[in-house]
Image (spheres, rainbow, N blue to C red):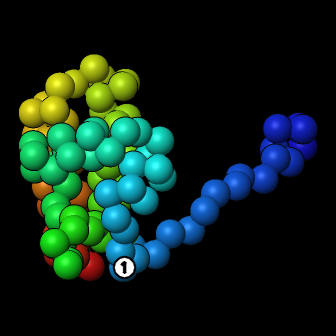
């Protein structure tokens, strides 16, 4: 076994049912709150409005991080990010549907 095989992966589990504020989401994604607002305006993130403040589900953290990777790695603009995420999620849905029919 090589030394690289011994390395443990580390990470954090996050409850997808958690409720996050704009501040929480921006802090966890390490971006300015304005960036989160732009994601909402472009339809990348969905808002839950509670007490006249924007709130997000834990799933928004996954989507925001994916959007940031698409922006950075593929140099997509916001409209491109929104379209790419929509297509990725449609592909995932179709794969789940296909897997269900094959069983």
Farthest residue in the top direction? 75
Left or right: 101 in relation to 31 = left
Residue 71 visible in the displayed image: yes
In this rendered view, identify the residue nearer to me: 58 or 51. Answer: 51
- Residue 87 screen position, x and y as percent: 13, 46
Q: SS of the residue at dot 1? A: loop
Farthest residue in the front direction? 52
Q: Relative to 64, is 74 above or below?
A: above
In this rendered view, identify the residue nearer to me: 98 or 62. Answer: 62
Instruction: Identify the residue shown where x is 26% and y is 68%.
Output: 55
Instruction: Identify the residue shown where x is 30% and y is 53%.
Output: 63
Residue 67 visible in the displayed image: no
Left or right: 8 in relation to 46 = right
Instruction: Identify the residue shown where x is 40% and y is 76%.
Output: 18
Left or right: 7 in relation to 72 = right
- Residue 62 screen position, x and y as percent: 37, 56
In this rendered view, identify the residue nearer to me: 100 or 90. Answer: 90
Image quadrant holding the N terminus, namely top right
Question: In which quadrant of the rendered view does residue 97 lie?
Answer: bottom left
Instruction: Identify the residue shown where x is 44% and y is 46%.
Output: 29
Tell me the residue that label 1 is attached to. 17
- Residue 73 screen position, x and y as percent: 37, 24
């Amino acid at each position: 076994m090589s030394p690289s095989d011994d390395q443990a992966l580390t990470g954090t589990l996050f409850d997808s049912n958690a409720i996050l504020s704009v501040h929480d989401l921006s802090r966890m994604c390490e971006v300015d709150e304005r960036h989160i607002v732009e994601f909402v305006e472009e339809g990348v993130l969905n808002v839950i409005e509670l007490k006249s403040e924007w709130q997000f589900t834990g799933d928004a953290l996954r989507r925001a991080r994916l959007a940031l990777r698409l922006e950075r790695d593929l140099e997509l603009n916001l409209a491109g990010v929104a379209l790419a995420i929509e297509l990725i999620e449609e592909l995932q849905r179709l794969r789940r549907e296909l897997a269900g029919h094959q069983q």
